[in-house]
Amino acid sequence: MIFDIIIDERVAKKIRDAQIRKIPLQVVIGDREAENLGQINYRKYGSEEVITISASDFVKMIHDANINHK
């Protein structure tokens, strides 16, 4: 599974659960992130670095990864 949507849980628990489940990309959209939907903050599995890119670049990255995965 490339991504999972989890609603109504604390952010720290969501991140911990995603790490345990080895979700490749973790995107958390909380109140702060919702204020600027033009940018996406994501984290790759196994890394604590949070990467910020434009929403359009993120969509392109996911699209390209899906094409290369097939």
Image (cartoon, rainbow, N blue to C red):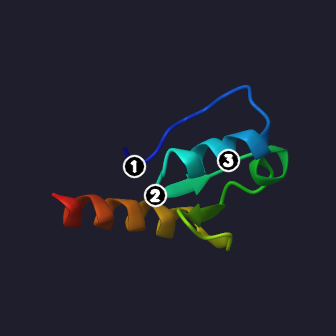
Q: What residue type is labelled 3?
A: Arg
Name the residue that disc number 2 marks. 24
Taking the spot 48% from the left edge, 70% from the top edge, the residue there is 57
For label 3, the crowd category at 10 Å Cα-Cα, with few meaning under 14, some 14 to 19 and many 20 or more, is few
Along the viewing direction, whichever of 18 and 57 lies nearer the viewer: 18
Q: Is the C-beta separation of discs 2 and 1 under 8 Å? A: yes
- On residue 16, the disc is 3
Along the viewing direction, whichever of 53 and 22 lies nearer the viewer: 22
Q: What residue type is labelled 1?
A: Ile
Q: Which of marks 2 and 1 is nearer the N terminus?
A: 1
Q: What element carries label 1?
A: loop
Eyeballing the image, is 64 above or below 11? Answer: below
Q: How many marks?
A: 3
Name the residue that disc number 1 marks. 2
Taking the spot 68% from the left edge, 41% from the top edge, the residue there is 14
For label 2, the crowd category at 10 Å Cα-Cα, with few meaning under 14, some 14 to 19 and many 20 or more, is some
Left or right of 49? Residue 45 is left
